[in-house]
Image (tube, rainbow, N blue to C red):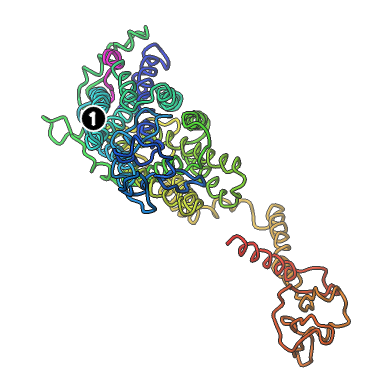
Amino acid sequence: MRDYEEIVSFLGEWGPFQKTIFFLLSASSIPNGYVGMAVVFIADVPSHHCRLPLNLSSAVFELNQSIPTEEVKGEIILSRCTRYKNLDGLVPGFGNETEACLDGWEFSTERYTSTIVSEWNLVCEDAWKAPFSVTVFFFGVLIGSFLSGQISDRYGRKLIFFATLALQTIASLLQAASNSWELFCVFYFIVGMGQIANYCVAFILGSELLSKSVRIPFSTLGISMCYAVGYACLPFFAYFIRGWRMLLLALSIPGFLYIPLWWYIPESPRWLLSQGRLEEAEAIIRAAACKNRVTAPDVIFRQDDCTKLMETNDSKKSEHLYTWLDLFKTTNIRNITIIQIIVWVVISMTYYGLSLNTPNMNGDPYLNCFISAATEFVGYGATWLFLCYMSRRFSLTFMLLLCGVTLLLLKFIPDELNILVLTLVMTGKTGITAAFCFVYMYGTELFPTVVRNMGLGATSMASRIGSGTSPYIAHIGKYNKIIPYILMGSITIVTGILSLLLPETKDEELPEHISQVKPLRCTNYLVFLNHSKSMVMRDYDEITSFLGEWGPFQQSIFILLSLSTVPNGYAGMSMVFLAGTPHQHCSLPYLNGSMTNLSEALSMEEVKGHLDQSRCTRYKWLNSTGKPFGNETESCMDGWDYSTEQYVSTIVTEVRMLLLSWINWMLSAA
């Protein structure tokens, strides 16, 4: 089978056709940037307190007389879930007993005119409903990831791309018109399905329409940067539109601007060839040639370019339908799928875990949201550099290790150094953001064309397991702030090392069929070593026999390698002196260096047949002028004094001092 890239090489790398596809598909990801994160504002919890009974609402009361106070994050505020009971006397008043907010709540409109929390009173007993809305969204993303892969591989990239874009837009509009929290969650579930399906299909479509040299800018500077643009636009929309319904409406309307793209974005010729639709694929390539003003050959594709992309069990049937089971059909694609799933789950868990567990940034929430979006630009820009100048395997490993190491370093940073803590957290988030962008590109190069979108959908679907667990990891931070970072950092480091097993795909042709999937790197090494071992045992001595047995070369090697063992002779035996134990006794700080009462202060013990001063005990200090020491003994609570007659210092003298200081530090920390 001829190579697809070679067949369409006459189109050029960066003509008007490629530019149009690049910018239109990239722009389609802008809504994805704010759809999921809009819940930051539409589900925010305004300041609130219990509403007073109707018969007392017109009376003049100080709020602290009718509502108790509580401490939240070190600040004293009015209780959000209780109020004092009304005395029901002739004179209105309140007692000391409290009750729930039987008449509802009063919400502050200082920041928002309304949110879904204030709309449906999602506080106190119903406070779980607001974060559960996000869980429903991620569950929709999970289902969308699973379905989009199969239906786009079966019905085409273009159709599913526009269908999911329309689904996302319409569901978001209906969400803004919801009259209950339950209906809001239903539409949010559909929005999640459309959002991830649209993003995945756009990524696949661009990778298959654009040439190899343009895929890297498309995946980083294109679609991912536009995602960050959408994320950065969100705080501006939210700042000027303070009501959640109008905000959702404003965020949904731009989806209609993508309708004309139907006439500018074609179907993937790769997918058409894999389905045996040669004429349609050739028509698209000829239209692209016309747009790029190049002459197409008389015959672009041959019939064998289609038949070898299809499984033909019968000469009369030329189409084979692939399912997700094909991702585990052979050893190579099974290994790739399993490792990719692990990588995606950990990346998603860490990305959303960091987003939820980032230290509170004091200040305006709109500015904080914009700063968070700015880290996306840094991460995606770094991804572009890695994709251009480094191998795929080592790039992914570096990003994961960067995140993991910086998170583990937080264990050793005092809480008082807020700027340093924030810098390390944001560095870790930049690394995991870059990895999140990177795995999309890497995944398209690892999976073959016939199941590429299905493979990307399956791994993206599996990553929702990670995003689903991330709120619970962040919840641990309420009890111990450092444990979430240790957990995420450790898992990320292990995953980074595991990713080294993936095959290298930089500057390689995309695999078309399952049989073309590369094996893991460790498999290649084992095959090479086994082959090399048999060759060495059979031929090497015979091949090099002409060198002779004892010439200058062999003599040099003999002497130099022998000399290299000289340090080994004293390296291990140096412990005889390094670990020598000098003569010592308990330190006696209350004698002020005087040796006159040393024999009275130290008990005696038998060492090697003669009496000597005890090395581990001393008499208790009575602090009296008559008899300063009693008969009871105690351990060397103030350390030891060592003789310098034989050694200035050894590891025995040093380690004991370090051990004591370490124990004291641990006790003070506890």
Lateral position of residue 638 relative to residue 492, left or right:
right
Find the magenta span and give its range.
258-273
Lateral position of residue 193 relative to residue 525, left or right:
left
Lateral position of residue 667 relative to residue 433, left or right:
right
The quarter of the picture where the C terminus appears is bottom right
| Majority SS type along the magenta span | helix
Lateral position of residue 375 relative to residue 97, left or right:
right
Dividing the picture into quadrants, the one containing residue 176 is top left
Asked if residue 347 is among those painted magenta in the image, a careful observer would answer no
Reply above or below: 610 against 234: below
Reply above or below: 477 against 185: below
| Depth check, front residue: 174 or 656 | 174
| Depth check, front residue: 656 or 502 | 656
Reply above or below: 258 against 626: above
Q: Mark 1 points at which residue?
A: 178
Number of residue marks: 1
Asked if residue 263 is among those painted magenta in the image, a careful observer would answer yes
> Residue 169, how many percent across, how many down?
27, 24
Dividing the picture into quadrants, the one containing residue 587 is bottom right
> Residue 54, how many percent across, how many down?
29, 38
Residue under the point 42% across and 46% down:
524
Residue under the point 54% across and 47% down:
405
